[in-house]
Amino acid sequence: MKIYWIASPFSHEWALCPVRRLRELGHEVVLFCPGDSPAARRARELDIPARDVRYPTRLRDVPGSWRCMAALRRIFRAERPDVVYYQMIPVSYWARVAAWMAQVPVRVYKPPSLWELEFPLYRLLESATAWMDTLILASSRSLESFYRAVPGGRTRTQLSYYGCPLGRFDPRLSGDAARKEFGIGPDDLVVGMVSHFIPPVRRVASDIGIKGHEVLLRAAGTIVGKNPRVKFLIVGDEHRPPGRGDYARRMREMAGTLGLSGNVIFAGHRADIPAVLAAMDVVVVPSLSENVGGAVEPLLMEKPVVASRVGGLPDVVLEGETGFLVPPRDPEALASAVLRALDLSPAERRVLGANGRKLASSLLDIEQVVAQEIALFQKALAAKGVTRGQSAGA
């Protein structure tokens, strides 16, 4: 198949994993994104061909949006891809309209999260334009429910999680080196959180960041009051839109104000996430808005997860089986669930972790995810009377 993959400038590696796998299977896949973007740089590292396409910086830039759609439409009409695949708002709008106008046989949207749908404008635009898609790949049951309710979307929506290579996450990996680096004793219990620092957004919560760092810090006070041997290892860097301020710094100050400086470790950005996860006993995902999100990697490392009952997190955090669910924005509920997990014996936590890896592996194995999506593309092409897409990688 000839697949044009329209990427956000800030697409993470998880968004490029399917491109790499499709190319390994013999399909012709080309990435479209700004040539100087993080996505393009990562594509070059992965030897994925990328074409330089400029996107408007704001959805409200109507002239820029029309120019972008017109440019994409010309390319699609001239080069006739079998599939145009797009992932992230607002880039998805320009690709969706352009592909529909160019009559591309299969137009596929795979939203990575529910985050954009928190905003009324995006929710309205999705409801108004999703009918242009041939296929919507919902990456959680919450997204599936939303798109099945969109007019005309019911029969075109399929549940398909974002896949990742499982080999990177080896639960046999020792966390001793990370514990030593951070001064964590052998008898300490470690509660971890791996996430960007994303400041509060008024439409979601004016006083709590999207990933819920404040919720964790307030819960930490209760937890340390009951067990002073608990350490909190917070991994991630600043994700700061212009004008938001130094949110990560404010979280460090908050930990100090709460008297938690001796128990909370801010590790910053880490490239060795599996090794750091190996040092943790329990992982928390206290997000206010999330898809499957930060629960996947700890589950693949066989760590029990305590997560907010929002978005796609209940798909992978099963109460009492892979971890525990709590209401969002509730520090006391989070503290209670974390203490419950820490009160389990190491063997009991290992059972939860093993269940988590089994579940996450069954849903997110990149080879299975891509095979499923290829079959869906080929079925859609066949329904349009297009057969050339079945020649490669079939």
Image (cartoon, rainbow, N blue to C red):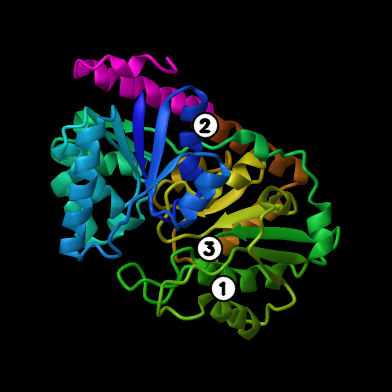
Q: Residue at x 34, y 67 (%)?
A: 204
Point out the tag, 1 or 2, that comes first from the N-terminus.
Answer: 1
Q: Secondary structure at mark 2?
A: helix
Considering only vertical position in the picture, is 141 above or below 8? above
Q: Secondary structure at mark 1?
A: helix
Q: Is residue 125 left or right of residue 194?
A: left
Considering only vertical position in the picture, is 376 above or below 187? above
Residue where numbered disc 3 is placed: 196
| Residue closest to the eye, 385 or 178 | 385
For badge 2, the amino acid type reads: Ile
Quarter assignment of residue 3: top left
Q: Residue at x 19, y 19 (%)?
A: 384
| Residue closest to the eye, 189 or 105 | 105
Point out the tag, 2 or 3, that comes first from the N-terminus.
Answer: 3
Query: Which numbered dot is residue 366?
Result: 2
Q: Residue at x 57, y 80 (%)?
A: 249
**Residue 390 visible here:** yes
For badge 3, the amino acid type reads: His
Quarter of the image that includes the C terminus = top left
For badge 1, the amino acid type reads: Arg
Query: Which numbered dot is residue 218?
Result: 1
Quarter assignment of residue 383: top left
Q: Is residue 219 left or right of residue 259?
A: left
